[in-house]
Image: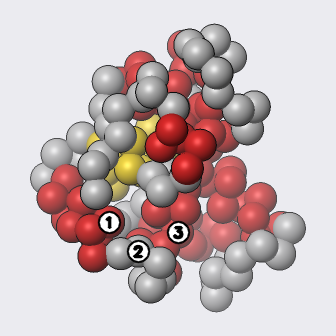
Amino acid sequence: MILIDTHIWVWWVSESKRLTLDLQESLLNNIQGGIGVSVISCWEVANLVERNRIRLGRSVRDWVSIALGYPGVQLMDMTPEIAVTSTQLPGDFHRDPADRILVATARIYQIPLLTVDELIQAYPHVQKVQH
């Protein structure tokens, strides 16, 4: 199983050209084992729509419902352990709460995170999917 960052999820569902062949391959290679989507990504997508940063072509509720039905996708809840861990990450990591929750989720479940976020890529205390 892997966990995917919100932007990867949006690019995948919207068939964005930003989802490189390497990223597509990473997704396809992990459908069998599971592709985790954090509940915080649902919040992030809704927040991006509300701030007019992205357009989905349908309501956020419909988009999330459809996107959670993609092959291999498993919704990962934010547990109390993840919430607390997100505030106690080792080393130096930026303050973005959604990124902290994603990193904490990957750490708690001991699964790699698929992202192109440079700050997460540079953070040594979380496994990343190599792409």
How many C-alpha atoms fall within 10 Å of the one at disc 3: few (<14), some, or many (≥20)? some
- The quadrant in which residue 72 appears is bottom left
How many C-alpha atoms fall within 10 Å of the one at disc 1: few (<14), some, or many (≥20)? many
Q: Which residue is mark 1?
A: 23
Tell us which disc is closer to us: 3 or 1.
1
At label 2, the amino acid type is: Leu
Residue depicted at x 32% and y 24%: 110
At label 1, the amino acid type is: Leu
Q: Nearer the viewer, residue 60 or 97?
A: 97
Q: Tell whether 85 sits left or right of 96.
A: left
Residue depicted at x 67% and y 70%: 60
Which quadrant does the C terminus fall into? bottom left
Residue depicted at x 35% and y 40%: 128
Q: Is residue 42 above or below residue 93?
A: below
At label 3, the amino acid type is: Val
Secondary structure of residue under mark 3: helix
Disc ID at residue 63: none
Q: Are marks 2 and 1 in contact (CB under 8 Å)?
A: yes
Q: Which residue is mark 3?
A: 10
